[in-house]
Amino acid sequence: MGDRSRSDRGPGEHFVGGSRDGLPEPIVAQGLPRSVRIVEVGPRDGLQNERTLIPTPVKLEFIERLGAAGLQTIEATSFVNPRWVPQLADAAEVFPGIVQRPGVRYPVLVPNPRGLDGALAAGVADIAVFASATETFAERNLSSTLNGQFDMFQAVLDRASDEGLTVRGYLSMCFGDPWEGRVPVEQVVRTGRRLLELGCYELSLGDTIGVGTAGQVTALLEAFGAAGVPTSRLAVHFHDTYGQALANTLAALRCGVRTVDASAGGLGGCPFARSATGNLATEDLVWMLTGLGIEHGVDLSSLVATSVWMAGELGRLSPSAVVRALSDTGPPGDTAPPGDTAPPEDTAPPEDTAPPEDTAAGEEDR
Ligand code: MG
């Protein structure tokens, strides 16, 4: 029965997905990596931009379920000033509460030296710092300047090195800035290289407002390569504001990138972007990788169930297309004609509910 063609199937007997297990049929494409490491950012980057405050035990269950679904790197929280990101005010309770799975890394975001104090007290092993590729965002989000931000990172990275921590670098606004518009490629490469030279083992290139397109991604990655940065030290972090996150991810994979950030259920967003659509959904990424025959280690049904559960905690549907298609929140498919089955539009918050800035350190928090 498994080898019947689609035309042999009886009425109402279609398979969800491309095969009986509800997954796309893998067709290995040339010029793509055999495996991809997913950095799951839902508990940090996802939740920090959600307005509904999530209790600590729910966050811990979220992290546990993500690990159970097979995710190997789960960014757990941020040791940011609670005044700036109230959602993550419980970082000192969340991190020690994680029942760590063997082989799984649980990095945390550390915006400044004070955040590093908190992270060290909580016993973290892996941290991430968050930099800006533009002058205006450095000023607005870090109360610094494009060059001045590195003084703060230097202090964090030096101490992290002494303490034996690994440090990942995020670089935001790599493809466009809401105040400055286009961001010169050479400026992104120069800023990114400085972060790597300070001691970050990996640089995650962020399209913070989701305006980038595939040609830009290719051009930026080629520019990093021409500057001597191997793709093994680069990751990508896309937002789906304009529906480009998967196309951009595929462009990055074709350039040799093997690490992709994603957020379960598409949690999160950016207060500077034009819609509430947020991070690339991990489920959407997993669906594409599966279809391309690329190893990722994630059980999609477990992940979808987790995102449906978390959507319930947040009181809204997941914006992920794959979560909707594979869960009861999606259209019924067999019984209703296309175009008549769209779920209610409940994901866009009102104009006045912009979530907090990504890390918002603030001068007084240093
Ligand atoms: Mg993000």
Image: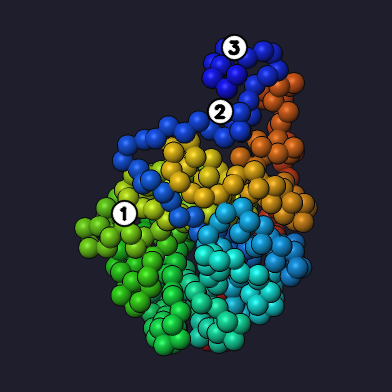
Give whichever of 123, 317 is nearer the camera.
123
**How is this picture coloured?**
rainbow
Give whichever of 192, 104 is nearer the camera.
104
**Residue at screen point 39% across, 65% down:** 203
Q: What element carries label 2?
A: loop
Q: Nearer the viewer, mark 3 or mark 1?
A: 3
Residue bearing the label numbered 3: 8
Q: Which of marks 3 and 2 is nearer the N terminus?
A: 3
Relative to 93, say whether 26 is above or below: above
Q: Does the residue labelled 2 lie within 8 Å of ligand 1?
A: no
Q: Which of the numbered marks, if any, corresponds to residue 18?
A: 2
Query: Toward which corner of the image does residue 172 lie, by quadrant?
Result: bottom left
Expressed as whole percent of the image width and height from the top left, the position of residue 315 reads 78, 53
Disc 2: CA contacts within 10 A as few (<14), some (14-19) or many (>=20): some
Q: What amino acid type should be assigned to the residue bearing mark 1?
A: Leu
**Residue at screen point 73% across, 39% down:** 329
Q: Earlier in the sequence, mark 1 or mark 2?
A: 2
Expressed as whole percent of the image width and height from the top left, the position of residue 305 reads 70, 47
Give whichever of 178, 224 is nearer the camera.
224
